[in-house]
Each structure stands twice: as C-alpha cells, then as structure tokens.
C-alpha cells in the first residue's frame, strides 16, 4: 500500500471569505499531488457549499476519498476534530489548515511518511521548516536520534530542550500524528492556563515547557514539507508570499478563530496591545507581560466555565460513545 494512503488528512477550518476558500482548494490540491488521497473535511463559515461543489467536480478526474462533516454538537474545535479523528479508518493523521501549501516533492514526502510509520512516531510538525532549523540540527546530534536525508526521528524525554536556545513546539497545529496519540492529545485539557479563548484551535499546541505527553516519539522532515502562505513565524521573508511563490491575495491580519466564548474581550486585548505598541514605547516591558497575564487569566476562567457546561459534557460523552464503539 502506498505510504500516503495510510494517512488521513483532517481539515477543521473556518472559511468566511472567498480568498480563504481559494487558499483551501490550493492547499488541498497540493496534498493530492503528492499522494494524499484520504481526507476528512469540516468547514465552518459561508463557503462550505462552494468548496464541496468544487471538490466534487474535481473528484471525477482524481480518485480521492472525502468524508464530509457538517453538523456540530458544539463549536469546540478540539472536540469536533476528535470526532473526525475517531471516525477515520487510518492509523495516522495529518492535521493541517487552509493556509499551508505542500511544497515537498512526492519522493521526499513518501519516504518521510514511510519512516514515520515504520518507527511508530507519535508527532511531527510539518510546516515552518526554517523556524525549526535550529531544533532540527541540534536534535539530530542526540544519541537516541535516527537521521537520514528525509528526516530526523528521535524520542523526546524530560528536559529534551535544555540544550536548544530557542526550542519550538513539539505538538503543532500543522503536523502528522499517530492516531492513538492524537486522540490522547485532543482529550487532554493541559495546561491549565490558557493563552487563547475556549473553542479555538490554538490551545491544542503544546510548547517546549509542557511535559505531560512525554516521552514522545518525535520527527521532523529534513526538507520543506508544508509552508505557510503568509506567516513568517519569526523568520523574516520565509512565508510563500514573501518568497513570491504564492501570489499576494490578501494582507495578513492577526486574527485568531473568532468562534470563541469571549470574542469581544479577545478583540479588546488585541486593540489595547496594538495601541500601546504604537503609542507606549516608554512603558516598561513588565506592563505588557501583566497585560498578557490578565488576558490568559480571563481565557482560563472562560475555559473552566465552559468545561463544566452541560453542552461540553454532552459533546464529550457522545464522542466517548463513538470511541467505545470503534474499539
């Protein structure tokens, strides 16, 4: 069986505009071109029907398989994604977003996936190749690391990042996962302090200081697998638009998923920080840290309230029933 056919690509994305719909179709086709033919798609926003019609017509020419998800028991990104993962028959999941294009060639992609599966890895970030450069180079020197031209494959243990000056997320929103490991990550509610509001996808990512999921069989590709269209991720001019590989369809804004329980507060903090950066150059750095702490506290309180809501418990119990039926 071709390696990529052992992977299901899961999309749980918000498409409120035409340019994002076009980006999604481009991102979808870029993965089809390198052999990923199994997809699970849930689209929120006003362009779901447009995308479904477009992909349905294209399916007459390319033999890909799509499972569509329409109804939502809640607006919780993690639980909705968990539903898609539980109902996939693949043992490995590629989680991605509409603004990440596959730039790797078929041979590199296929061989990286082959090694990821054979070594039974748990997680591997697939985008922001240049952002992970330092981490990739230093982890390749670790004694428990296997390295080849396609990737590095290692096991992360406690304090794995102590010799890496700028460690990056070991669990990323755009990456490949072993299905059982991803289910554990989606069900887990750690860490307690939430940087982002409830229901958004961004709390799923785990930073280098988080250790609850360790030990973790971890992989990084030795080539650019996926690349973000418009986000440099702290490496100037590394996104596809800055490299003039993808056309400038829309200027990036610092918006996060607005389907949250505290969207007005989220917007308020964003505007306050933007104002202070422009007009508050003399304000101490501690003030900005305090503002970030207050925002995290509010997000955490909102998350705790949501966690004990009837809607959350009902959605979670439904998913546990699906999980038990599949075992």
Image (cartoon, helix red, strand yellow):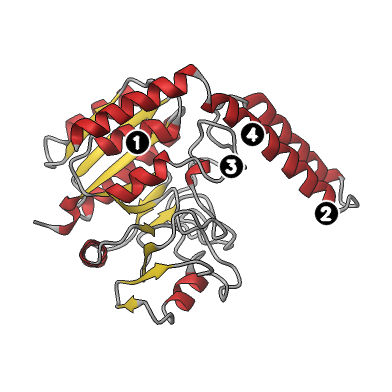
- Upstream in sequence: badge 2 or badge 1: 1
Residue that mark 3 sits on: 192
- Residue 74 visible in the current orientation: no
Give me the C-alpha separation between circle 1 and circle 4.
22 Å
Picture quarter with the C terminus: top left
- Residue 189 visible in the current orientation: yes
Where is residue 286? Give x, y as percent.
Answer: 83, 52
Give me the C-alpha separation between circle 2 and circle 1.
39 Å
Residue drawn at (64%, 34%) of the image: 299
Q: Nearer the viewer, mark 3 or mark 4?
A: 3
Where is residue 141? Give x, y as percent.
Answer: 43, 82
Label ID, residue 299: 4
- Upstream in sequence: badge 1 or badge 4: 1
In the image, 301: left or right of 116?
right
Label ID, residue 285: 2
In the displayed image of the protein, which residue is found farthest to the top? Answer: 310
Give me the C-alpha separation between circle 1 and circle 3.
20 Å
In the displayed image of the protein, which residue is found farthest to the right? Answer: 282
Residue drawn at (19%, 43%) of the image: 38
- Upstream in sequence: badge 1 or badge 3: 1
Give me the C-alpha separation between circle 2 and circle 3.
25 Å
């Amino acid at each position: 069986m071709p390696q990529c056919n052992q992977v299901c690509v899961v999309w749980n994305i918000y498409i409120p505009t035409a340019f994002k719909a076009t980006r999604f179709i481009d991102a979808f086709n870029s993965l089809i071109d390198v052999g990923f033919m199994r997809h699970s798609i849930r689209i929120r926003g006003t362009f779901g029907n447009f995308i479904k019609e477009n992909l349905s017509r294209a399916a007459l020419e390319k033999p890909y398989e799509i499972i569509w998800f329409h109804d939502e028991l809640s607006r919780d990104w993690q639980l909705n994604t968990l539903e898609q993962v539980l109902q996939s028959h693949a043992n490995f999941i590629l989680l991605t977003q509409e603004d990440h294009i596959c730039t790797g060639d078929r041979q590199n992609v296929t061989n990286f996936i082959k090694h990821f599966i054979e070594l039974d890895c748990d997680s591997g970030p697939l985008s922001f190749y240049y952002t992970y450069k330092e981490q990739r180079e230093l982890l390749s020197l670790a004694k428990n690391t296997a390295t080849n031209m396609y990737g590095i494959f290692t096991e992360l243990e406690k304090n794995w990042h102590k010799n890496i000056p700028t460690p990056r997320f070991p669990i990323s929103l755009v990456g490949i996962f072993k299905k059982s490991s991803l289910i554990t990550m989606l069900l887990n509610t750690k860490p307690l302090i939430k940087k982002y509001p409830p229901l958004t996808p961004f709390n799923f990512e785990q930073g280098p200081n988080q250790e609850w999921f360790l030990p973790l069989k971890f992989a990084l590709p030795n080539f650019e697998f996926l690349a973000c269209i418009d986000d440099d991720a702290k490496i100037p001019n590394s996104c596809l638009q800055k490299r003039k590989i993808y056309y400038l369809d829309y200027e990036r804004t610092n918006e996060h998923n607005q389907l949250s329980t505290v969207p007005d507060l989220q917007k308020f903090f964003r505007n306050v920080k933007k104002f202070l950066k422009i007009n508050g150059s003399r304000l101490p750095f501690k003030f900005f840290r305090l503002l970030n702490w207050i925002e995290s506290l509010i997000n955490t309180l909102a998350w705790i309230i949501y966690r004990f809501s009837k809607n959350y418990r009902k959605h979670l119990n439904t998913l546990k029933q699906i999980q038990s039926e599949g075992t």
